[in-house]
Amino acid sequence: MELYKSSAYELLNNLAKKEVTAQDITLSLKKRIKETDSKVRAYVRINESSKEALKPEGDNSILKGIPVSIKDNICTEGLNTECCSRILSGFKPP
């Protein structure tokens, strides 16, 4: 089974059992996005700094290692938030 088809619960169990790594999950998702997004057009951008994202701040993170997608109208520190609007092109939230 492809990792991108797994639920967060299944992925967390696989991570706990060390059957997969967070990097395996991220690579599976990136591959799937690359294969399908030209038709679906769901992603405005992919944060390529995933190495940083794979380093949870602490071992108590509930979803550590689980990638997420964030809609482009939610402010994210250090990343452009443009709401798919030319007026907001290049806007980085404070």
Image: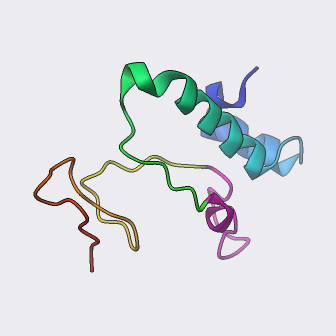
**Where residue 38 sits in the image (x, y, percent)?**
42, 24
State whether residue 15 is above or below residue 51.
above
Q: Quadrant of residue 51?
A: bottom right
Q: Quadrant of residue 62?
A: bottom right
Residue sitting at 20 percent across and 51 percent down? 83
Left or right side of 74 for 65:
right
Q: How many marks on residues?
A: 0
**Is 65 one of the magenta-colored residues?**
yes
The C terminus is located in which quarter?
Answer: bottom left
Residue sitting at 14 percent across and 52 percent down? 86
**Where residue 49 sits in the image (x, y, percent)?**
59, 62
Please name whichever residue, 39 or 59, is drawn nearer the observer in this view of the structure. 39
Left or right side of 76 for 53:
right
State whether residue 59 is above or below residue 47.
below
**Where residue 42 sits in the image (x, y, percent)?**
37, 33
Query: What colour scheme governs how the chains and residues are painted in the rendered image of this protein?
Result: rainbow
**Where residue 25 sits in the image (x, y, percent)?**
71, 42
**Is 56 one of the magenta-colored residues?**
yes
Left or right side of 88 for 19:
right
Q: Residue furthest left?
A: 87
Q: Residue furthest right?
A: 18
Please name whichever residue, 16 or 41, is drawn nearer the observer in this view of the structure. 41
Q: Quadrant of residue 6?
A: top right
Q: Main secondary structure of the magenta part?
A: loop
State whether residue 37 is above or below residue 25.
above
Residue sitting at 45 percent across and 27 percent down? 37
The N terminus is located in which quarter?
Answer: top right
Q: Which residues are magenta?
A: 50-66
Left or right side of 47 for 92:
left
Residue sitting at 64 percent across and 68 percent down? 52
